[in-house]
Structures are given as structure tokens and as C-alpha cells.
Image (cartoon, grey):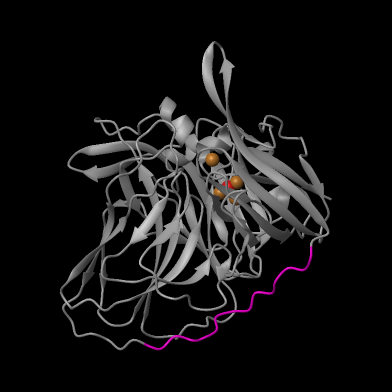
Amino acid sequence: AWPTLGARGELRAAPGLLHWGGGLNTPSWGYNGAALGPLLEWRAGEAVDMTLVNALPEASNIHWHGLEVPASEDGHPRDAVEAGQRRAYRFTVPEVDGLFWYHPHPHGRTAFQVAMGLAGPIRVRGGRSPLPADGIDERVLMITDQRLLADGRIAPHSDADWMDGREGDLLLVNGQYQPVLSVRAGGWLRLRLINACAARYLHLSLPGHLWRQIGADGGWLEQVQAPVKQLLLVPGERADVLVALDGAPGSRAVLQSLPYVRGKMVSAEQSRPEPILSVHYQRTAAQARPPLPRRLADIAPLPAPAVRREVVLSETMSMEGGKHQMAFLINDRRYDDMNRADFTGKVGEVEEWTVHNRSDMDHPFHLHGAAFQVQWRQASAQHPRAPETLRAWRDVVNLKPDESLALRFVQRQPGDRLFHCHILEHEDQGMMATLRVV
Ligand code: C2O
Ligand code: CU
Ligand code: CU
């Protein structure tokens, strides 16, 4: 059983040893143990008081990814907790009903610390669920990937990892390698998915089954979506989906990630489906599948913006110490000053940002402090703008090369809010900037 914690408690970040069986051990870092951090179960409106105890050999902190918390409590890289120190994070859980996650955010060290194992999920319950009370089997699946050396140690970042983002050949679910998910035929399987990989795009498929999306990063969608065969989940992103359990009792299906080309510069693109977990139908008789509601939630569109800004993601080659280095930039700048404001905005004002990807690879764009709604997308300057038909609260959105999109949001609290590429190696190398909210 996976440990859970409520809104008050301690997260002790410390080195530990992961045991895979067969004598293979991996020195790793974790919260309250060597594996993935505990599942935090919170209620909207409740007071959080979580203490980070930093027993790591370096500075770290905690960012509550996707949750609107005061800037001082949100794990800004300026607020790193030194090795051997502790600090409390205190805030009120916002009025949301969704799946979020926590991970370190120290400047330049996020990719390394997450690769060492520091991350965990947060399930926030708020309001009444629009879903039927019975016949739904809900599971949180936090997907990560890992690469080990022959002796079991975590493989260090390679030069290619610093360009393309680090992927591992081992796909893990809730810290386990290819686990079995046992289900009963009939009913619905509700999967609460988090892509917590540094750079791997998850192109999910469960052969013989269809996905009906009901929620995105920030919580419920307005309606149950039409069934689809595949679901793309980019780094940092979450999805809430229902799968009809209509396999025969005793049968199996394998959840896998299908190839997805994301414009890697050095490493090979994924070419084969990769298994993530197996779903095993129990032999017992099927249960009944309850009908789904037509409406899940209301999402009010955001009014016309008070401010419009342009954000350009790009990459360039530079020379550093006689070596060619890739630089990942936002509006031609690298994040190299934690106190610089790239934009200044106001509390309560609607912002509309047009984000352009002027590089040759996909980048998952992420914003702190507020969820956003995507307004339109444009595949390239030669294409027309397509209005976004799915209204959803998100905090991560992918941009393909040459793509542009517009998003709207409102920051409701003052402070410095980061926005960055959620390929953690790109973030660490400076594809990050600051919106100062006053
Ligand atoms: Cu999940 Cu700024 O990060
Ligand atoms: Cu975040
Ligand atoms: Cu990127």
C-alpha cells in the first residue's frame, strides 16, 4: 500500500536505498522513504502546514505544481532550504477538485533532484463529485521514468539528456516497474494520470479500450468527452479519464505508451510501444456500469484581456568554454537572475499571452500561480487560427515546432510567478522567466 498524508505533516527529503529484488539496489532520494513521495490527500479550503525537512546533501524546496498558493509558499528557487535545514509551508488549499503534484524547484537542480526520485502526487477533493457513487474504481497513476547503470545506480545526465531532456528506459507507475492493476469487469475504471517524467511524452493506449476524458490539470471538464483511442500526456500534465471495463473476466490488457515524435536533437525518437502496466480482469462476474452524467462542471470563459503579451520559446547554439552548447530561451533571454522581472502584471487583471514555439522541438509550457484557458491554436504562421473548443483549466500546454497559441489567466495573489518549459533540463538551463504580479 502506498503511504498517504493529510494536510499537516512532515516531508523528509533524504537519501535512501530502493530495493528492486534479485539483490539490485538503487541509491535514491525520496520523501519519507526511498521511493516516490506519499500521496497527499487534501480537501479544498483546508489549512496546509507541511514541513520540509531537508536531509539531502544540497539545497532543495517544494513546489506545489498547479495549486494557487501564495508566492512565498510556492517553492520559488530563491526560497531554497539549505541542507540540514527545515521550513514549513503554510497555505489554504484552493477551491479546486483535481490532481496536482509536488516536486523540488531549486535553481538549476530541478532535473537532477527529480531524477533522483523527489516527487509525489496531491489529490484535492472539493465540492460534490458529479460522478455516480458506485461502479467506479478510481486509481491515481503517477508515471515516471528512470535509467539505471548496471550496478543499480541512477545513471547520471548525459550531454544528450541536457539537450533533449532525460528519458529513462524504465517506465514506473507509482514507483513500481510494470505493476498489475486488478479490476473487475463491468463498471468504469477512473484513472487519475500524472506525467511526472522529466521529458518523456506519454502517448497512452490501452488496446481494446477507449478513453473518455473528464478532467484536465485543474479539475473537471464541462462534459465527458467522446471516446478516443489515445491520449497524449506531456511532462507535468494531468488527465482524469474513464475507461469502460468491458474486457472478459480473466482477460488482460497492457497500458502502453505509443511512439510520439517530439523533435529530439540528439537521441533517437521512441519507435516502439512501451508497456507501462497490465490490467488484469478478475474471474468474478461482471458488475453493472452506471450511466454517466451529461454535465460535469461549469467553466466560465475568461473575459477580454486587460493586457496582451508575446512569449517566444527558442533554442540557439552558443560557445561556452570552447564547447558548443545549446541555450534554451524565453524572449531571447535565459533565466539567470532569480530577481529579474520579465513581465509585470496586476492582481486580478486578465492576461492574454500568445506563446510561440520558434524551435525545432516540442516544449510543454507551464505557468505558476494560476491555471489558464487556451483560446486558440495555430499550427504555423501559414495556418489559420483554430479556436480551442475544449474549455479547460490547465497549467501545462504543449507547443509543437512553429506552433503558436493564446492563453488567458488571472493571477489573484501578488508575487513572482515563474513560467517555463516543463522539460526539466530545459527549465534548469534557463527556459524560464518571471511574471511579477503586483
Ligand atoms: Cu512542475 Cu515550475 O513546475
Ligand atoms: Cu509548477
Ligand atoms: Cu523545452
Compared to residue 209, the image places residue 131 above or below, namely below
- Name the spot of residue 126 as percent of width and height, x first: 59, 74
Q: Quadrant of residue 66?
A: bottom right
- Name the spot of residue 61 as percent of width and height, x first: 59, 42
Residue at the image position 78 percent from the left and 44 percent from the top: 343
Task: Considering the whole magenta stretch, tell me its main secondary structure.
Answer: loop
Residue at the image position 40 percent from the left and 27 percent from the top: 158
433 lies left or right of 244 = right
Residue at the image position 51 percent from the left and 86 percent from the top: 294
- Name the spot of residue 153 as percent of width and height, x first: 32, 32
Residue at the image position 39 percent from the left and 29 percent from the top: 156
Q: Quadrant of residue 331?
A: top right
Compared to residue 14, the image places residue 289 above or below, namely below
Query: Do we see residue 286 in this rendering?
Result: yes
The N terminus - image quarter: bottom left
Q: Quadrant of residue 207?
A: bottom left
Query: Do we see residue 54 in this rendering?
Result: no
- In depth, the one of 386 and 113 nearer the eye is 386
- Name the spot of residue 370 as percent of width and height, x first: 68, 58
Range covered by the magenta-colored residues: 290-304
Compared to residue 101, the image places residue 97 above or below, namely below
125 lies left or right of 275 = right
Q: Is residue 303 highlighted in magenta?
A: yes
